[in-house]
Amino acid sequence: TRITFISPDNQHITVDAPNGESLMEAAVEHDVPGIDADCGGGCACATCHVILSDDLMAALLPIDEDEQYLLDFLDNRQKNSRLSCQINVSDKLDGMIITIPKQA
Ligand code: FES
């Protein structure tokens, strides 16, 4: 699945990620800047914050309670903010562009 990340310093990085791993893992494996993932994917740090397109946001499963709780702490939360460790790579992400905001 081909996914393009736009890093906080505006690098466009396209990766080929296997379905099933998390979007956070795909970014970390390819050294995409801006995804620190301090908690290692435990939905406890929010340093894997990403912004999705409207289309992708609508295509994914809704945000669960734990993720919602963490997103509420982000000063730079936006309409399409998600935590990338809570999103699994799947065909729905193919060709998508994922924007990484500056860490709050
Ligand atoms: Fe910590 Fe996603 S990696 S919340």
Image (cartoon, rainbow, N blue to C red):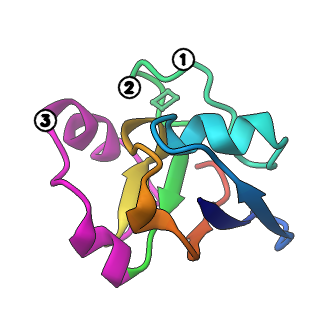
The stretch drawn in magenta includes residue 59: yes
**Residue bearing mark 2:** 43
> Marks 3 and 1, how far apart in space?
18 Å
Q: Secondary structure at mark 1?
A: loop
Residue 77 in view (yes/no): no
- Tell whether 53 sits left or right of 12: left
Q: Is residue 90 above or below residue 10?
A: above
Q: Is residue 13 above or below residue 66?
A: below
Residue 59 in view (yes/no): yes
Q: Are marks 3 and 2 in contact (CB under 8 Å)?
A: no
Q: Is residue 89 above or below residue 4?
A: above
Q: Position of residue 21 (x, y in %)?
A: 51, 34
Q: Secondary structure at mark 2?
A: loop
Q: Looking at the image, is mark 3 or mark 1 earlier in the sequence? A: 1
- Tell whether 68 sits left or right of 78: left
Q: Are marks 1 and 2 in contact (CB under 8 Å)?
A: yes
> Marks 1 and 2, how far apart in space?
7 Å
Q: Looking at the image, is mark 3 or mark 2 earlier in the sequence? A: 2
**Residue bearing mark 3:** 65
Identify the magenta region: 54-78
- For disc 1, does the CB lie below 8 Å from ligand 1? yes
